[in-house]
């Protein structure tokens, strides 16, 4: 789907850069220290969705099942660190 999108995390929670999870022509230069989320949503049916009146809930227009998952990542000098990885982030280790 085209929503939700990932987003930067910093002084505000939902901030630039916004990270699209579908083929697009937007280019994002990754720099060390950037922290952002990756939040893909997969649907069993069509990709079309709508945001409900509560401005939080997202449902598929065709009523098909959907799943959304989120990870927070940080760009490092060596690549990327997954901050929400239960194997490497001690604060999530009790979730295993």
Image: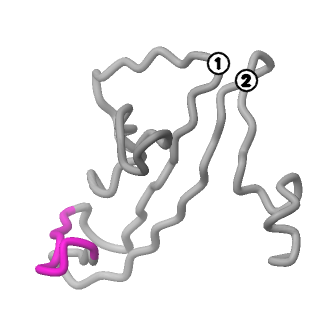
Q: Residue at x 47, y 54 (%)?
A: 39
Query: On the rendered structure, is 28 left or right of 76?
Result: left
Quadrant hosting residue 75:
top right
Q: Which residues are magenta?
A: 48-56
Mark 1: few/some/many CA within 10 Å (<14, 14-19, 20+)? few
Q: Residue at x 27, y 77 (%)?
A: 57
Which element carries disc 2, helix, strand or loop? strand
Quadrant location, the C terminus? bottom right
| Residue 29 highlighted magenta (yes or no) | no
Q: Residue furthest front?
A: 11
Which residue is label 1 attached to? 32
Q: Residue furthest left?
A: 53
Quadrant location, the N terminus? bottom left
Q: Residue at x 45, y 73 (%)?
A: 67
**Main SS of residues in magenta:** loop
Mark earlier in primary sequence (1, 2)? 1
Which residue is label 2 attached to? 76
- The colour scheme used to paint the residues is one colour
Query: On the rendered structure, is 1 left or right of 39?
Result: left
The image's mark for residue 87 is none
Which element carries disc 1, helix, strand or loop? loop
Q: Are marks 1 and 2 in contact (CB under 8 Å)?
A: yes
Q: Give the percent coordinates (x, y) of residue 53.
A: 11, 80
Q: Give the percent coordinates (x, y) of residue 19.
A: 39, 38
Q: CA distance from mark 1 to mark 2?
A: 5 Å
Q: Give the percent coordinates (x, y) of residue 72.
A: 60, 49
């Amino acid at each position: 789907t085209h929503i939700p999108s990932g987003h930067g995390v910093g002084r505000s929670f939902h901030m630039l850069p916004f990270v699209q999870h579908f083929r697009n022509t937007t280019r994002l230069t990754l720099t060390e220290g950037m922290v952002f989320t990756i939040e893909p949503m997969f649907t069993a049916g069509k990709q079309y969705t709508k945001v409900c009146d509560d401005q939080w809930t997202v449902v598929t227009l065709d009523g098909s099942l959907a799943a959304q998952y989120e990870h927070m990542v940080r760009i490092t000098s060596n690549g990327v660190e997954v901050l929400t990885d239960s194997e490497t982030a001690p604060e999530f280790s009790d979730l295993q």
